[in-house]
Amino acid sequence: QVQLVESGGGLVQPGGSLRLSCAASGSVGSINYMAWFRQAPGNERDLVATITSGGSTKYGDSVKGRFTISRDNAKNTVYLQMSSLKPDDTAVYYCNADINTWGGGRVVYWGQGTQVTVSE
């Protein structure tokens, strides 16, 4: 079994910053890509950013230049540094990882989600 545990969400004012973390634990052999998605009420879950095992990154158009994804392979952890936050960034943020597990093959996992609210 593998668990993805997110942390770092909360309430922040427009223009502020937050850093999200997501740590994978359990039967983690190696991790292929890691990613962040977000879902606002009434909306579909959208891709925010991805990062490969080699460090290549991609971003959704709405967050380019404001958000930075990074990972610590030794800690099986992915981060999302969010800056210049806007009210439209308000959503539940989900961690996603493509993991080669010990004895279970290659599986895509989701975290439980962490709320980010951008408001005065």
Image: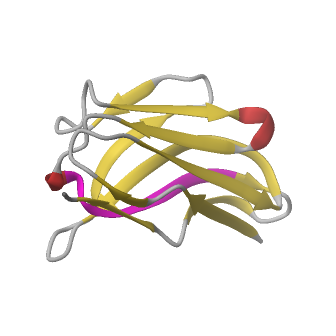
Task: Identify which residue, 10 or 94, lies in the foreground.
Answer: 10
Q: Is residue 8 magenta?
A: no
Which color scheme is applied? secondary structure
Is the stretch drawn in magenta largely helix, strand or loop?
strand
The quarter of the image holding the C terminus is bottom left
Residue 104's x, y, as percent? Answer: 77, 65
Q: With 34 as the anchor, is 45 left or right in this view?
A: left
Q: In this rendering, is residue 44 above or below 9?
A: below
Task: Identify which residue, 87 or 105, lies in the foreground.
Answer: 87
Residue 28's x, y, as percent? Answer: 79, 54
Q: In this rendering, is residue 35 above or below 72?
A: below
The magenta span reads 89-99
Tell me which residue sits at (52%, 72%) in the image. Answer: 112
Q: In this rendering, is residue 39 above or below 75?
A: below
Task: Identify which residue, 79 or 32, lies in the foreground.
Answer: 79
Tell me which residue sits at (85%, 63%) in the image. Answer: 103
The answer to which image quadrant residue 61 occupies is top left
Residue 33's x, y, as percent? Answer: 55, 41
- Furthest residue toward front: 120
